[in-house]
Image (tube, helix red, strand yellow):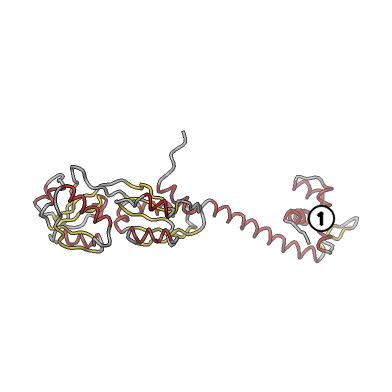
Amino acid sequence: MSIDLKQLKYFLAVAEEKSFSRAAERLHISQPPLSQQIMKLESELGVRLFARTTRTFELTVAGKALMVEAKDLLARMRMTIDTIRQIDRGEVGRLRVGIVGSAMWGPIPRMLEQFQTQYPRVTWTIHELGPNDQYEALRARQIDVGFWREPRFDEVFLKHDQLRQDLCFRENACVAVNEHHPLAKQPHIELTDLAGEPMLTLILANSTFSRYLVQCCIDAGFQPAIYQEATEPQTLLAMVGAGLGVAMLPETTSRVGWPGVVFLPIKTNPPSANLLVAYAAQEDAPVLRAFLNIVNPPPAAG
């Protein structure tokens, strides 16, 4: 049996119009090929679909049953085609996003809000992971996109694992000090002003960004005095607010407005706190492509 959707479409037109001539006009075809398709459909099914006399044109019992089923089938096919097109445009699906915690104080919430507004049928989830864990999750395709800060992963390793890393958001590190600290009244400071200060940092063993900041201090000529390590940036801010030390954090952290904490820019050679976005280089999933167009919009034509 060989029945195609065109035959069902033709059948419905004739059934609804109760006229071959009106159906042909509606379908923008001539009447002979329409009649041939209906006869072919009846032959394939082995039933009569229309009871034709010189005065009447009615559907048979089989024709009435086919009319109901054909309407349902064509409606479901239209829905299927629409869904496939939405998937191709990235409008349907899921997105798994890996982030470092401090990224949520930067542009990520705005990007997610825009993505949710433009693609409300996409389900997305946030996975808070360190850069190394994100890297492994990207390799294992357990997340679709990841966000981490400087330092960048080596391009040789990225290429070997078929991953790509792009700049997402530029910013520098700043210094959080207690509002009563002698440095708090300064409009900006030098990195060397932190020499001898009790330094509060994210756990060095888990944070490549914190290890990078320590190296920046060493490059500036002093070994930072690490006083306490913590898992979360807000824990560092709470300790700074309590006067327990100073901390280097991304500039966007200042948006938090933590009580008792002053954020100071670093004047000369401030360490970078750039946010990077990473994803599978060969991945062309429409949902990911749609999200990346929000993260890094393509240049305007012209």
> Residue 84: where, in percent of width, then height?
58, 55
> Residue 68: where, in percent of width, then height?
72, 63
Residue at 75% x, 61% y: name it.
67
Residue at 27% x, 59% y: name it.
207
Callout 1 secondary element:
helix
Q: Taking 250 as reference, is 192 left or right? A: left
Circle 1 residue:
38
> Residue 211: where, in percent of width, then height?
24, 56
Q: How many marks?
A: 1
Q: Quadrant of residue 267?
A: top left
Q: Taking 75 as reference, is 187 left or right? A: left
**Viewer-side residue, 59 vs 66:** 66
Amino acid carrying mark 1 in the image: Ile
> Residue 218: where, in percent of width, then height?
17, 51
Residue at 77% x, 64% y: name it.
64
**Viewer-side residue, 15 vs 167:** 167
Q: Taking 147 as reference, is 181 left or right? A: left
Q: Is residue 72 above or below residue 298?
A: below
- How packed mark 1 is, by other alpha carbons closer than 10 Å (few <14, some 14-19, many 20 or more), is many
In the current view of this chain or complex, which residue is farthest to the right?
54
Question: In what quadrant of the picture does the N terminus appear?
Answer: bottom right
In the current view of this chain or complex, which residue is farthest to the top?
302
Q: Taking 95 as reference, is 188 left or right? A: left
Residue at 29% x, 51% y: name it.
151
**Viewer-side residue, 268 vs 302:** 268
